[in-house]
Amino acid sequence: MAHTNFSSSDIQIKTFQIQNDSDEHAVNDFLAGKTVRHWSASFAPATSLPSADGSPIVLGVWNVFFAY
């Protein structure tokens, strides 16, 4: 296996907030052709609304971090 040394100047950082399908498509478009070195994601719930059947719908945002 070949090892490649990366300096800190080779790594770039990008964060996204994903709330809907268009946000997710933007992330996918951004990542095309990039090599991801690290990523993490967290979900921050916002509000809970009842759906048509009375069960709660949790609204919120995914915060996604990429090092590439």
Image (tube, grey):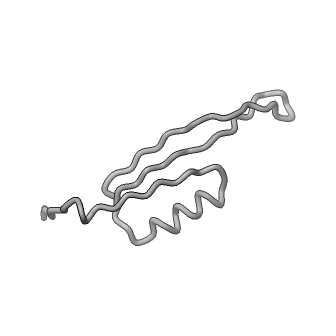
Q: Which residue is depicted at the point 69% across and 38% down?
A: 59
Q: Which residue is depicted at the point 18% across and 62% down?
A: 7
Question: Is residue 22 rendered to the left or right of residue 13?
Answer: right
**In-front residue for pair 3/43:** 43
Residue at the limit of the structure toward the front, as seen here: 9
Residue 20 at what x, y percent from top left? 66, 53
Quadrant of res 57: top right
Residue at the limit of the structure toward the bottom, as seen here: 33
Q: Quadrant of the N terminus?
A: bottom left
Quadrant of res 51: top right
Q: Which residue is depicted at the point 45% across and 65% down?
A: 31
Q: Which residue is depicted at the point 58% across and 36% down?
A: 44
Q: Is residue 50 above or below residue 18?
A: above
Question: Is residue 12 rendered to the left or right of residue 22?
Answer: left
Residue 18 at what x, y percent from top left? 59, 51
Residue 49 at what x, y percent from top left? 78, 32
Q: How many numbered circles are shown?
A: 0
Question: Is residue 1 rendered to the left or right of residue 27?
Answer: left
Residue 62 at what x, y percent from top left? 56, 44
Residue at the limit of the structure toward the right, as seen here: 52
Q: Quadrant of the C terminus?
A: bottom left
